[in-house]
Amino acid sequence: MAEAQAQAPGRFGGHLSVAAAARFAAPIGLVVVFIVFFIATPDFLTTDNISDLLVSASILLVLAMGQQMVVTVAGIDLSVGSNLPWSAAVLGYAYTHGWGLSVAVSLALLAGLAVGVVNGLLVSRLNMTDFIVTLGSLSVVSGFTLLLTSGNTVPVNSDFLRELAIDGIGPVRWFWVLAFLVAAVVGFVLFRTRTGTYLLSTGGNIDAARGAGIHVDRIRLIAYASSGLTCGIAAVLFVARTGGSDPSLQTDLLLSSIAAVVLGGSSLFGGKASVLGSVAGAVLLQSLINGFTLLGISQYYQPIAVGAVVLGAAFISRFQK
Amino acid sequence: MTDATSNPEASGRTATGDPPLVRITGLRKSFDAVHALRGVDLTMAAGEVTALLGDNGAGKSTLVRCLTGVHPPDAGEIRFRGQPIKLNSPDEARRLGIETVYQTLGLIEDLQVWQNLYLNRELTAGFGPFQVLDKKSMISHSKEILSRLDVDVPNVRATVRRMSGGQRQSIAIARAANWGKTLVIMDEPTAALGVRETAAVEALIRRLRDSAVTVLLISHDMAQVLRVADTAYVLRRGQTVARRIVKDTTGDELVGLITGAIEGDTHG
């Protein structure tokens, strides 16, 4: 992971100040948020709170890793907002129909992957605009979810999933391990494999990539499929954490997943990726929500705060060349 | 001066008996009602710099796209080392060792120089699905490639975004030359460059020729053609109108042939 970051393009400094601030927006913001909340409340920087914070951040982090793949190829995946509840609903449906947990989890992963593959095919093969495709599937998939669940929350009472959410190896929670693995795989693929080079090339200059003989359609499909699969993984974590699947919830994860990637220093125009930055971005956004809750600030302010951070990141990224 | 066209193979560096590297005869290509190529004849001798001249719309780009497998020609023949070839995709041209430097260069700005040199030809270590990029080899080979061609890029680990126009052009040419073992096609390589950078790119073209790479150079700069090319072909309205040995011609004559002020040698 550290090496992956070292390979992030454009690390050769020189332009300090604003450009550097843009690149390191997420880590800098993370430190600032930690200091502010540490001063504001003694409850923030405690072992228990940080442990729980990172568990909540794990779900967002996994989603952000999928979004990172899509953003790298200059795309955007808006369907994560409904793909996560959809995959969670499939898990709940399969589990409550007595198909066993392993089958239910597999189906949830497949359900997420399927949405990603359809997005990818529409974008790459039919050359439809990514924004419209995933906006459309955002709506279609949320409809499927409501049909499957009739709009009801499905409780999933699985000891295995409960332990997954609560336990770990000593102080290291299982959620962290899973999130770390997903981030490590994404970092490895992006910066250590030919596929990663093709992802960065396709996002950076699709005509040049095609001219070099890279199968850009396949590469874009891989990106969207990865995002779908991470939605499936995040859905399993989500069900484990909340003990059920709620079809109406979690649309704010969509904005947060994009925000985490943008905060991390990746360009929405593609071709630039920073896995560590996106990880820091995800933890930063979760810390904001966590700190606000601790301080007793009305949760109605949370979307304002998250949105303001995103707008701030977008503003700073203007200075990033 | 005009007798050169009567026997295209009599001159140039081709040893007697060796077929030319590329020989194009009667090439035609239409796009619906537009006849882009209406009978092009062109011979490229191995190890020479052949210049391709013509006004906008004369068919230069279409000819290049036929040579690189982008557009299959409607009629006519392309012989490569004496063998007739049919190119149906850029991959096939690439397999013959034909590389093209388009005006857009085809570099990925946010990737590093070595990544661009090895784009889609990455070296890997490992086996099966666990192929890991062999960065060390690619970086050290990239340094060799660039120093062999005397290209002035101090750090192969810098991103292309940080390179000047001349450096970018040189990197794109070096990439084409490194993989294009037989023929490198360059589409106006110095159109966007300053005087010093142009000189550097021209020196690079000469080094390519010295290392036995055949070059097809598309250029609007007559002085440049006179400086670096061995043979020049002039296209007008989709047809070859003249072939000139560069040391026996002048810029004025070439310009006249391009505009039509001087009648060509071949029938219209």
Image (cartoon, coloured by chain):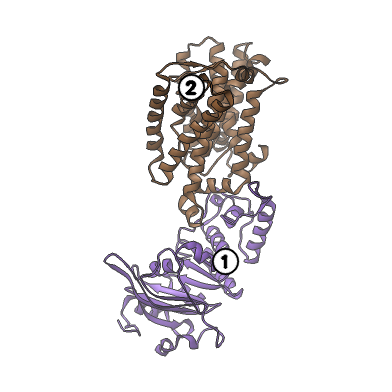
With respect to residue B120, does A256 lie above or below?
above
Residue where numbered disc 2 is placed? A93
Identify the hue of chain B.
purple
Q: Residues within 10 Å of mark 2 (few under 14, many from 20)?
A: many
- In this rendered view, identify the residue nearer to me: A231 or A201: A231
Q: Tell me the colour chain A is drawn in.
A: brown
Considering every residue shown, the one lying at the far left of the view is B33
Q: For this rendering, which residue is in front, A157 or A122?
A: A157
Q: Is residue A157 above or below residue B134?
A: above
Whether residue A283 is visible to the viewer of this picture, yes or no, is no
Q: Amino acid at mark 1?
A: Ala
Residue type at numbered disc 2: Tyr
Depth check: give the residue in front, B4 or B170: B4
> Closer to the observer: label 1 or label 2?
2
Residue furthest to the top in view is: A296
Q: In the rendering, which numbered label is found on residue B177? A: 1
Q: Tell me the distance, in whole angstroms, between the alpha carbons under discs 1 and 2.
A: 59 Å
Q: Residue at x 43, y 63 (%)?
A: B70
Q: Is residue B197 visible?
A: yes
Q: Are the residues under marks 1 and 2 on the same chain?
A: no
